[in-house]
Amino acid sequence: MKKKKALVALAVGAFLVAIGAFFYTLKVAKATSYLSDDSSACINCHVMNVSYATWEHSAHREAAKCVDCHLPSEGIAKYIAKARDGFNHASAFTFGDFKQPIKISEDGAKRVQANCVSCHSETVKTIERNAALNHRFDEEDRPCWSCHRETPHGSVRALSAAPNTLGVRNVK
C-alpha cells in the first residue's frame, strides 16, 4: 500500500512538473504571440531579424503586416497555413535546418503572389488591359517580385549581410 501511494505521488509530481515545464516553455517561446497578426511575432526567432527590419523600413509597413502577404487572407486556410508554417519554422530554426538567405517555400510563394495580385488588383487590371505587355498574373507566370525585387524586403537578406539588425528584438 505504501508503494502504491509513493508511485501515485511520484506520478502526480511528474505530471505537475511536466505541466509546469509546458507552460514555462509557452511563456519563454512567446507562443501566444503567434496567434496574433502582430508582425513583431516574426522576430521571436533572431533569424527573421533581417526580413523584419527590411519590411519595417519599406512602404509596405504602413499597409500590410507580415501575415497579410504571407498567409491566405481568410478562413480556415489562413490558420492551417499559419500552423503548418509555424511548425516548419520552429523545427528548422530549432535544429538549424535552413540556409541563408532564407528562401520562401513554393507554397508560400504562391500565397504571396495571390496576395500581391489581390491587394494591387487595380494595377493588375491596368497591366492586363495593356495589350502591349500581354502580361498575365497566375501561378504559371512570373511572380511580382521577379521585377519588384526589393519590395518589401530589399535586396540584402542574409544575416551576415545586415549585421546591424541583430539588435532588433520583440520586447512586447
Image (spheres, rainbow, N blue to C red):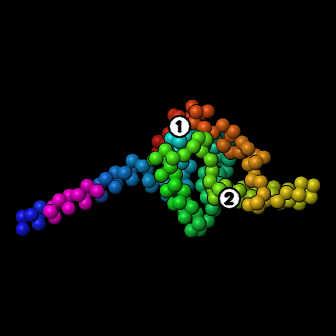
User: Where does the image place residue 62, in percent across and percent down from the top left?
Assistant: 66, 47
Dot 1 alpha-carbon crowd within 10 angstroms: few under 14, some 14 to 19, many 20 or more: some
Q: Which residue is mark 2?
A: 110
In the displayed structure image, the side of residue 169 where residue 105 appears, left or right = right
Pick out the residue farthest to the left: 2
Residue extending furthest toward the right: 132
The reply to whether residue 116 is in sight is yes
Tell me where residue 6 appears, x and y as whole percent: 12, 61
What's the CA distance linking mark 1 and mark 2? Answer: 28 Å
Write down the quadrant of residue 79 in the picture: bottom right
Residue 2 on image: x %, y %: 6, 64
The span picked out in magenta is: 7-18
Residue at (76%, 60%) from the top-left corner?
A: 140
Q: Position of residue 134 (x, y in %)?
A: 88, 58
The quadrant the N terminus occupies is bottom left
Identify the residue shown where x is 37% and y is 51%: 25
Marks 2 and 1: in contact by CB < 8 Å? no
Q: Is residue 137 left or right of residue 85?
A: right
Tally of numbered tags = 2
Q: Amino acid at mark 2?
A: Lys
Tell me the number on the disc at residue 168.
Answer: 1
Secondary structure type for disc 2: helix
Of badges 1 and 2, nearer the viewer stands 2
Name the mark on residue 106: none
Task: Give the residue drawn at x 11%, y 66%.
Answer: 4
Residue 20, by quadrant, is bottom left
